Amino acid sequence: YFHIEQMAIKVFGCLLKCSTEFEMFKLIHKPMSVLHRHLDVTKKNSTSAIIDEKYHYELVQDISTDERYFHTEFSEHPLPLSDAIVLINIATFIKEHKWYEMLNHLEISSKGEHFILYQYTDNNIYPTIISSALIQTTSNKHDWLFFDNFFQNTKWKPNLNADGLLSLSHATSMSPLARSQFVDKSSTEIENDLFYSILDKTKACEAIRLTISGEKSKANYHLYLAQKGLAMALKESGRDIVFTIIEKPAMVLFYQSMNL
């Protein structure tokens, strides 16, 4: 193990970078006989919705059981949906943003309900994934990152806009909300109060690990399509309120501009 560690540091700079590249390598270089054993190019989801003419979006209840194959910008050949999403998560979150904590939780991205946005191109018989996001229901709220201590900070100042709270109450199945009930409370207390104000918990979910892939010149456009498609897909599935963690300033500004 010492020898492996020395080689990893020499070639990659550190063990974490080496582990990241190794996880990507395993996904991309699976034996082709295994990779294409059940390959069926005719498999398409006829229930997907179309956004902006050529982009498809849908909610997949469990990506681990989906048998379709998709292209990504990180592999020359198509991969099963589950592998494709894991690969994109590794490449974007871990390799690009250096969120190495995710190396111990890759299985979360390989199963369960996911939103996907994809498109068919003239050159490929398989669609290309543009965006994906993990959707978690309230039945496993104990696993939500939204309420994890790692994503809390006592220095945060909550934005308790009265019109926003009123809009939230009207748009969702929540108990009436008033600004006064959140005064002098921490962000953790406010978030928990909001959650327990939801009358029908089946109408709530967490959406995390939103990825954006594709041409860099279209990054903002794809980000816009992903947010629009995700909102539409969740609304169509009966979700009225979504808890999420936003890292990109552009996304924060997007939602602020929408306001009510």
Image (cartoon, rainbow, N blue to C red):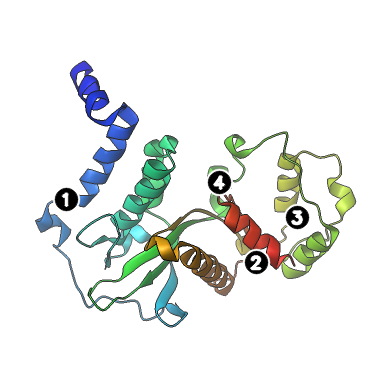
Looking at the rendered structure, the secondary structure element under dot 4 is loop
Pick whichever, 156 or 31, lies toward us. 156
Q: Secondary structure beneath disc 3?
A: loop
Q: Amino acid at mark 4?
A: Trp
| 136 left or right of 128 in image | right
Residue bearing the label numbered 1: 30
Q: Residues within 10 Å of mark 1 (few under 14, many from 20)?
A: few
Q: Viewer-nearest of labels 3 and 4?
A: 4
Residue 137, how many percent across, how many down? 54, 56
Side (left or right) of 197 relative to 236: right
Q: What's the distance in space between the residues labelled 3 and 4, CA to CA?
A: 17 Å
Label 2 and label 4: CA atoms lie apart by: 17 Å
Instruction: Say which label, 2 or 4, has the lower sequence index.
Output: 4
Residue at 38% x, 36% y is 104
| Residue that carries the numbered disc 2 in the rendered image | 240
Question: Relative to 38, is 159 above or below?
Answer: above
Q: Tell me the kind of residue under disc 3.
A: Ser
Res 99 quadrant in image? top left
Tell me the crowding category of disc 2: few under 14, some 14 to 19, or many 20 or more residues within 10 angstroms, Cα based. many
Q: Residue at x 41, y 35 (%)?
A: 100
Q: Which mark is first along the chain, 1 or 4?
A: 1
Q: Position of residue 93 (x, y in %)?
A: 42, 46
Task: Give the mark nearer the N terminus: 2 vs 1.
Answer: 1
* Contact (Cβ within 8 Å) of mark 4 with mark 1: no
Query: Which numbered mark, 2 or 1, is in the foreground of this view?
Result: 1
- Residue type of the residue flagged with mark 2: Asp
Which residue carries the number 3 mark?
197
Disc 4: which residue: 144
